[in-house]
Image: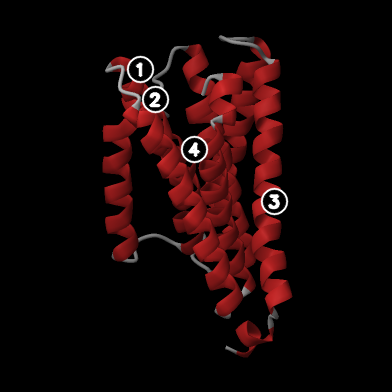
Amino acid sequence: MSQVLELSVRKRLYYSLGTMVLLITILVLAILLFVSFGPGASWPRGITGIILSFFSFSLIWLSLINNKSVFSTWTGIIAGMTTWMVIGEISHQFGFAVIEAEEGIVLLIFISAITAMLWSKKQLSWGFQVFTASFLLNWWGHAILLPQLFLAERFDASFFYLTYTIAGALCLAGFAALLFHIIRKPADKMQLIYYGLWLYALLVTGIEGVTRITEQTFGH
């Protein structure tokens, strides 16, 4: 408990917001890399997918170590990020299922529910819990928004453009609430890094929902 109490508000913000900034940087670099490949299958995209897959499997293996530490938290977070890049951003260019929008909703709900059950029964190591959170937060960030665009276009219902914006605003409100919690409540480095993952997901999804910047720029 003393280790938790020793962390000042400044240090709490440093670890949580620092994690968030790092993850946003990784996201932006990944988007720029994938866009540089152009649409469709290509050797550079395929090689990148293979490298990221091996990297993901290695980090997931490390995340299975049943100990709560800064190291296991980071391996879980990065494993979730790279796994999403392969499954959500690369594989569909080679003809595999597009899961990030409405096509993946049912699968996402089942995976999230099963993960929640295993989590509640303490059947997952801490690092693997963080991995699943990282992967599913990236997936949910897409799934919260993209199906609304599908509904708006399919049924010519502009109402869903409004709910798209509202969803983004709610994510930004969640971001502010979590930031307030970080400032008010003591937490150790491991927990603050994990909070940074949530700050990243809420902020990125919130900004996209309010501005539609990525959807209008890259079409997804």
Q: Amino acid at mark 2?
A: Leu
Q: Residue furthest bottom?
A: 2
Residue topped by disc 4: 209
Q: Which residue is mark 3?
A: 21
Disc 3 residue crowd, few under 14, some 14–19, many 20+, Cα 10 Å: some
Q: Which numbered circle lies on residue 153?
A: 1
What kind of element bears circle 2? helix
Q: Which residue is mark 2?
A: 149
The reply to whether dot 1 and dot 2 touch (C-beta < 8 Å) is yes
Q: Position of residue 57 (x, y in %)?
A: 54, 40
Residue at left offset 35%, top offset 17%: 153
Q: Quadrant of the N terminus?
A: bottom right
Depicted 211 relative to depicted 220: above or below: below
Left or right side of 24 for 138? left
Place of residue 55 in the rendered image (x, y in percent of width and height, measured from the top left): 62, 38
Cα separation between marks 2 and 3: 28 Å
